[in-house]
Image (cartoon, grey):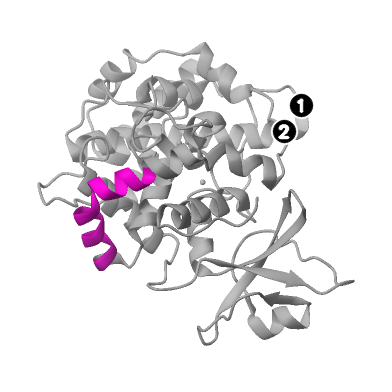
Amino acid sequence: MVACATQPQAPAPAPHPTGKPIGTGGTPAEAAPERKPDLPPVDLTPVPFETARANFVRDTAARYRLDPAYIESVLAQAQIREPIIAAMARPAERVKPWNEYRPMFISQARIDGGRRFLATHRDALQRVQERSGVPAEVIVAIIGVETSYGANTGSHRVLDALYTLAFKYPRSGDPEKLEREVRRELFFRDELAKLFELAAQEKLDITALKGSYAGAMGMGQFMPSSYLDYAVDGDGDGRRDLFNSHDDVFASIANYFVKKGGWVRGGTVAVPATLDAGREELNPVDWTPTLGIEALAARGYHAVVPVRAAGATATPITLEGSDGKQYWLGFQNYYAITRYNLSKMYAMAVFQLSQAIAGQELPPA
């Protein structure tokens, strides 16, 4: 969220299946801005709350041609929520190995729930699959991981969440973390501004919207920016409703994968691989598939199953399994899933859940 919105922790995701949804476990996927190289400098000078708030009203009004008095009237109803600050400041849990991570998000209950959800919405999902090329089971897996098939979309007012993080993002006091913390606050301030634009476009009651503690919304946990950029009207009613319209949700998740992730119709997501003894593991800084099959073979990586796509490129993936290291090759569609959440384990969990929902046997964790 997403879709997304996307440097998350392990995370924003029928009774509740076993294991907590990603969307509620750590920083929601869509609320974690992607790290980008060569960012412009950011002013680290503290700005008083009143000044920052007044500047926000002025700039948002000019940017979206809104009445400053309207923005003021909405912000007057917003509350700084200490539980949101505490949740965002919570120390990150240790990074779990794959064999501990996967059971958090893939259980028999979640698989069964996904199969029921797919059966219930099969016709709508099939239409989206035919239009976009994104398989129905992948769309269902995203919804399952993010919000337990819509059962847990978040209980925080989105206005409060974004207002809190836009103006009171927690500070650790560590000088080495200050720049990141300032950039995060500015990220959420921009999302708050875009919430006003979204509410205007979609005729939403900005004070009534509920979502995650970081402001991700709907069954797919979209941040306002992703809602604006990637949400589509799947049912033709003239609105993009990611809260109540399954048609809109399915079409929007697929659109996110295609437009942001470059999803390839009929393409492979990932395949298991081996690494020749004595060869060095490759640990890329991101999951862009840049190496051809021959180049990977020259580095000791070999797909266990045939890769039929001519000229296919992939990225090597290493996971800590229960019986030792697991090696995989992730292709363009694996990269597309990482646009929802940059974690390699998140992408693998979504992929393997989708496979299980489709009736395929899971490999060992």
Image marks 2 and 1: residues in contact by CB distance under 8 Å: yes
Q: Which residue is mark 2?
A: 177
Q: Magenta part mainly helix, strand or loop?
A: helix
Q: Residues within 10 Å of mark 1 (few under 14, many from 20)?
A: few
Segment colored magenta? 114-130
Looking at the picture, which amino acid does disc 2 mark? Lys
Q: Is residue 230 above or below residue 135?
A: above
Helix, strand or loop under label 2: helix
Residue 12 lies, in percent from the top left, at: 47, 36
Helix, strand or loop under label 1: loop
Residue 10 or 304: which is nearer the viewer? 304
Residue 197 or 22: which is nearer the viewer? 22
Looking at the image, the residue that sits furthest to the right is 278
Is 97 situated left or right of 212 in this image? right
Q: Which residue is mark 1?
A: 174
Q: Quadrant of residue 289?
A: bottom right
The residue that appears at 24% across and 60% down in the rendered structure is 126
Q: Quadrant of residue 184?
A: top right
> Which circle marks residue 309 in the picture?
none
The residue that appears at 33% across and 36% down in the rendered structure is 218
Residue 361 lies, in percent from the top left, at: 52, 58
> Is residue 129 covered in magenta?
yes
The residue that appears at 73% across and 81% down in the rendered structure is 297
Q: Quadrant of the N terminus?
A: top left
Q: Is residue 174 above or below residue 262?
A: above
Residue 69 lies, in percent from the top left, at: 24, 21
Query: Can residue 7 be seen from the camera position used here?
Result: no
